Every structure is written in structure tokens, then in C-alpha cells.
Image: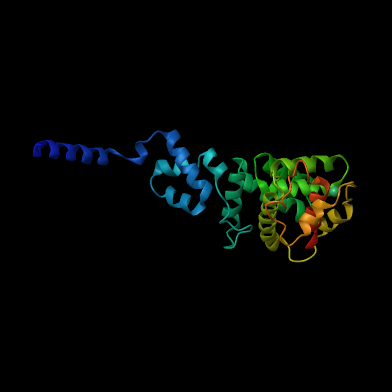
């Protein structure tokens, strides 16, 4: 039989254990990891975390946390007229290698600021860091520009966007188009001269395929157990990316 004094001592041990757990006492590496995981899902959560304590505020400013920070909740341009704070925040994110911040900079430079060369550099960097939207836009621009860059564009899109099956590849592409569309709405609501130039420069790569890839892409409901295609062995890459370029350039 367990004595009451033993139970009370076990309870006091549990209580003392509970009181001893303090977030600030955890190793800094672990705190950075926790903060960066929160940062990757929500900027507002990080803002709350910064208010916990001074050490947490410093940790939230860590390079790794800023690099992983999700900017989904942040508009493309400042909406409260506090340009300086907004621009300094994005500058810090870019400086710390945040892929989303790099992508936004590249997109604005390329399509709005007449700084296409610099814009491409930012897009390339963001794509290298694994930003899918950047890889999508950068790859399609390179394909439109033609020449040697075209092959590079195919390679980037194939390695970052393409999935083993056409159905999942198309699903991912639809999601990417939707995300880019949302940025476009902020950036321009009428014909964009850079986009028009890209459309004019684009030359479709000739292929001798059986046309099944285009049929798959144009079909309203192409999925089915025996109707899917393998992107590497049975789909035509030229037809796949040509279809995507057409859609990318469509809304100008
Ligand atoms: Zn083809």
C-alpha cells in the first residue's frame, strides 16, 4: 500500500518540476528552432512571441528565424503608409536570405521597375533557395527569352515543379498560377509592357510528340486510373511548358 506521505512527496516533486520549466532556460539552439518553426507558419505568431521576453525578442531577430519567416500575411506594398518600417523589414528579410522576400523584390524589379537584370538575379536566388513561385516565374521567363536560357528554364521548371505524374504536376501548377495571379492583381491591372515583350519574344520549341500531353492538359477532367501520364516517360516536356507559358502570358 502506498503511504500518504509518499503520495504527497511525489506530488510535490511533480509541482517542483512544473515550476522549474521556463522557456528562457532552454538551450538557445532549441529556442531558435522553436521560433523558426513558428515563423515558417505565421508572422503574427512571431510578433506575439517577441512580446514574451527580451531573450525571445532577440531570438526572433536571429538570421535563421528571419530566413524562414512566412510573409504570406504581409501585403506586397505597405497599406498603412509607413513605407520606411515596411521597407526596412523587407530589407532585413532579404539580407537574411528569406526566399519569399527575395522573390517579391525580383518580381517587382523585373515587371515594374525596369530593372530586369537585377530582377532576374533576385528571382534566381529565391528559386535556388527553394521558393516555388520564384522557380516558376524565373523558369518561364528564361523559356520566353529563348536561346541558351531556354534550356535552363526547362531544367529549373522540371526540377522544381514537375512531379512524377501529370495529374499532381497540373495540381501544383494550378496552385502556383493562383498565387502569381494574386501578386499580379497588386502589381498591375492592365497590360504590362515587360510581359508583352516576353510574349513577343517567345518561340515555341518544336516537338514530334503524339499530342497526348496537350490533349491531357486541355481535357476538362483528365484524371482517371488509366488516364494519367508519367511526366518523365510519356509526357512531352515541350508541350507541357508551352501550355504553361501560354497561360502565364495570357492575362496581359
Ligand atoms: Zn510535344
Task: Using the image as rendered, state which of residue 191 and residue 163 is in the foreground.
Answer: 163
- View extreme (front): residue: 226
- Residue 215 image point, x, y percent: 80, 56
Q: Residue at x 20, y 36 (%)?
A: 13
**Image quadrant containing the N terminus:** top left
Q: Is residue 208 left or right of residue 54?
A: right
- Residue 229 image point, x, y percent: 74, 48
Indicate the quadrant where residue 22 lies: top left
Task: Using the image as rendered, state which of residue 90 and residue 121 is in the foreground.
Answer: 121
All told, the count of numbered labels is 0
Task: Using the image as rendered, state which of residue 177 and residue 98 is in the foreground.
Answer: 177
Indicate the quadrant where residue 67 lies: top right
Q: Residue at x 85, y 52 (%)?
A: 211
**Image quadrant containing the C terminus:** bottom right
- Residue 151 image point, x, y percent: 83, 40
Q: Residue at x 81, y 52 (%)?
A: 212
- View extreme (bottom): residue: 190
User: Relative to 230, is 73 above or below?
Assistant: below
Colouring style: rainbow
Task: Using the image as rendered, state which of residue 216 and residue 94 is in the foreground.
Answer: 216
Q: Residue at x 67, y 50 (%)?
A: 168
Q: Is residue 231 left or right of residue 41?
A: right
- Residue 87 image point, x, y percent: 61, 52
Indicate the quadrant where residue 194 lies: bottom right
Amino acid at each position: 500500500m502506498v503511504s500518504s506521505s509518499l503520495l504527497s512527496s511525489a506530488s510535490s516533486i511533480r509541482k517542483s518540476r512544473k515550476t522549474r520549466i521556463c522557456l528562457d532556460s532552454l538551450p538557445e539552439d532549441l529556442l531558435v528552432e522553436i521560433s523558426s518553426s513558428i515563423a515558417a507558419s505565421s508572422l503574427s505568431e512571431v510578433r506575439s512571441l517577441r512580446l514574451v521576453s527580451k531573450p525571445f525578442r532577440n531570438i526572433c531577430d536571429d538570421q535563421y528565424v528571419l530566413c524562414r519567416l512566412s510573409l504570406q500575411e504581409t501585403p506586397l506594398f505597405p497599406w498603412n503608409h509607413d513605407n520606411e518600417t515596411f521597407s526596412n523589414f523587407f530589407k532585413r528579410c532579404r539580407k537574411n536570405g528569406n526566399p519569399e522576400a527575395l522573390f517579391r523584390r525580383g518580381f517587382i524589379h523585373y515587371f515594374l521597375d525596369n530593372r530586369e537584370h537585377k530582377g532576374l538575379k533576385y528571382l534566381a536566388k529565391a528559386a535556388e533557395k527553394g521558393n516555388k513561385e520564384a522557380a516558376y516565374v524565373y523558369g518561364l521567363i528564361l523559356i520566353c527569352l529563348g536561346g541558351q536560357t531556354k534550356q535552363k528554364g526547362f531544367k529549373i521548371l522540371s526540377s522544381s515543379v514537375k512531379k512524377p505524374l501529370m495529374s499532381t504536376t497540373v495540381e501544383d501548377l494550378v496552385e502556383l498560377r493562383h498565387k502569381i495571379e494574386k501578386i499580379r492583381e497588386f502589381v498591375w491591372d492592365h497590360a504590362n509592357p515587360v510581359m508583352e515583350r516576353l510574349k513577343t519574344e517567345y518561340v515555341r520549341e518544336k516537338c514530334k510528340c503524339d499530342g497526348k500531353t496537350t490533349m491531357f492538359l486541355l481535357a476538362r477532367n483528365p484524371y482517371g486510373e488509366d488516364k494519367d501520364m508519367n511526366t518523365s516517360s510519356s509526357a512531352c516536356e515541350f508541350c507541357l511548358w508551352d501550355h504553361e507559358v501560354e497561360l502565364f502570358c495570357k492575362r496581359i
